Amino acid sequence: MTGISIGNAASRCVAELQANRVAAALIGALALLAGQPAQASADGKTLYQNHCASCHGETLRGTFGPPLKGDAFRAKWQNGSQLRANIAETMPPANAGALPAAEYDAITNYVLKANGLAHLGLAAGSQSPPEPANASTTKLESGGTTAAVTNHDAAYEAAMAQLRARLDTLTPVSKAQLLDPPAGDWLHWRRTYDAQGFSPLDQINRDNAASLTMVWSTILPTGTNAITPLARDGVIFINSNGTVQAIDGSTGNVLWTFERDATVSPMGAPVTQPRGLAMYRQSLIVPTVDSHLIALDIKTGKMLWDHAITGGRKTLRITAPPLVVKDKIIQGMAGCAGTGEPGGCFVIALDARTGKELWRFKTIAQQGEPDGDSWNGAPNEKRFGSSIWAGPSYDPQSDLVYVGTGQTYHIAPLMNGAKRGPENAGLYTDSTLALDPDTGRLAWHFQHMTRDVWDMDWSFERTVASLPVNGKPRRVVMTMGKQAILDVLDARTGKYLFSHDLGLQDLITAIDPETGFKTSDPALEPDPEKPVFMCPFATGFRNWPPAAFDPTTSMFYTGISDSCMEFSWTPGEDFDITYGLRARPDSDGNYGGVSAIDLNTNRPAWSRRVRASATSAVLATGGGVLFEGDRDRNFRALDSATGEPLWSTRLPILASATPITFTANGRQFVAVTAGGGNANDVTTQSLTPEITPSKPGTILFVFAVPEDN
């Protein structure tokens, strides 16, 4: 499996999809195979190393997921055929049965052999190696030996002329428009530099939202979900598993398609799909699954340049969307965990015109450098993590880029002494980093959770806003971590201002009102002798789906996925912490919903709880409407003032991405991709077993109110 923080890790390692943790371990080991093409060899060891090792260890001893070796495993899986059937029928969650039969056989046999269990017979035909993953093939139109003649008749020529005319309406994106996007465009991951996830559009509003209807939809190439489209001049741009498309937002007509076959990294490890794009001038900036950034012409889809991001890491990857600031592309990297991933991740800046690297900033403090003495004296090669899973934000007033980092993956260096202090803080994990976009220099940092040895990431979006603080307007940057605690900081200096705890977590017992230092419950310290019960589970009460902020009301909105866990520490392992999903003992049976905080008063505004966990980001609009989705395939519009439902539809697969809104031909649309396969919708399945898991597939849905409404 790919080496990913279980903060995003649980969606990949899915160690607790079943009640039995050991049975789930192998299921989790295959969770990341979603959408991956066949490898060039059916050798079990090679396939295991490529697909599973970084999640469960090169020796099957466990990293992100529990071990796939030992007495408990052998006791559960004496029957290899049952193990094989279980894997093929249920995994991966977003694309069950995606691998060829020979590869499922080979991986199963490798694990069985490692446990001294009976070996499966190979499936018929498995001796013939499949096509290489990156092989390119040409298919004849007729499917026969002679290609069909394409019919370029008058209707075709008219359609092509109409397509070219539509593309000609696309205009370059200027610096001024990046700073203040047109109301009908969606130019950044969260529409604006401040990552508020708010659109001023109000054509869809409280009065007419009930009449929303699907206008069009289109099937996208299947891959890991969570992808966010962009919209410019009524054209949608979207990347799904290496296929980038420009689509007319009002009709669904595909204007151009760019395909890049790179679903495995150069090292052969499957990787998580990048979640977004960026635009600047006439370029569409596209991160790829093998850690490249490419630029495409927005009118033609032609590649302008291609830059490979190197770092010498087997599991280095991009999940975060890029951000273009002052002619530079700011990109955060993830996957810096486990064996072979020492020294942490980094932020990189490229020249937006050429793709040339300009600077990079390491997200783990190094020995001999500022803050480098915060790892209990551990050498750089024993410092892991600080991945960047979400897109950065930018404040032109302070001229700073804000990046959020995740936890470490190997807690042993921070466990030498129970006291949490500067010497074992583990910088820059769980921090907000304020960087100078011109140089990459660190202007300031704030660590939201020192010595995080529980996998409680603070790696999500950093929202910039103006808020009243002590009766005076203040420019702030804020973020909410997995524990559903919102921290608010001064945007220029990083000074701690205040927090808001939704009251769901039980790890933090106090927050210092002056410094923001969080005191943890000593009873919940990791214990190598026994598991520790705590809330939330490692995926958090909130995870990758971004929150939203309405600047007209100062209301903050976040989706919720309620859960708890049994947390275990196994010293000596590459990834030495594991988790068992548990329900809250006093749960009312509602595990999802949306909560709103009034930041004018720092008080709860409303909370709407439902059975199914939240899976999509929250989108706030000027029409007083919130959009959000859950694991039961519901996509809803809520009244942003009260949380009351205004409209709901049941999708064929669940909305597990970031909805956007835009205009085309003067009409407002709402778009969301659906398909599932992410942390909140995968790992919480056992809490609501009556909800049927979403089937494989990725679909883009577009909604609007009737034009005569």
Image (cartoon, rainbow, N blue to C red):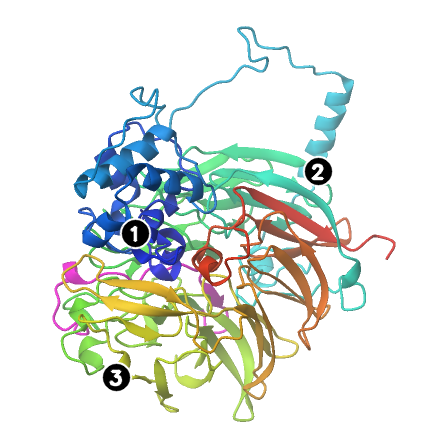
Q: Residue at x 50, y 71 (%)?
A: 463
Which label sits in the foreground, 2 or 1? 1
Farthest-out residue, right: 708
Q: Quadrant of residue 646?
A: bottom right
Which label sits in the foreground, 2 or 3? 3
Q: Residue at x 60, y 58 (%)?
A: 177
**Whole-percent x, y for residue 629 in the image:** 60, 60
Q: Residue at x 60, y 54 (%)?
A: 633
Which sits in the foreground, 99 or 389? Answer: 99
Q: Quadrant of residue 87?
A: top left
Q: CA distance from mark 2 to mark 3?
A: 62 Å
- What residue span does the magenta drawing correspond to? 372-399
Which sits in the foreground, 610 or 75? Answer: 75
Element under disc 1: loop
Prevailing secondary structure of the magenta residues: loop
Total label count? 3
**Which mark, residue 683?**
none
In the image: residue 260, left or right of residue 614: left
Task: Give the crowd class for mark 3: few <14, some 14-19, many >=20 residues within 10 Å.
Answer: few
Q: Amino acid at mark 2?
A: Arg
Task: Give the crowd class for mark 1: few <14, some 14-19, many >=20 residues within 10 Å.
Answer: many
Which label sits in the foreground, 1 or 3? 3
In the image: residue 62, left or right of residue 161: left
In the image: residue 290, left or right of residue 202: left
Element under disc 2: helix
**Which mark, residue 522?**
3
**Which mark, residue 3?**
1
Tell me the quarter of the image containing the C terminus.
bottom right
**Whole-percent x, y for residue 257 in the image:** 56, 34
Q: Amino acid at mark 1?
A: Gly
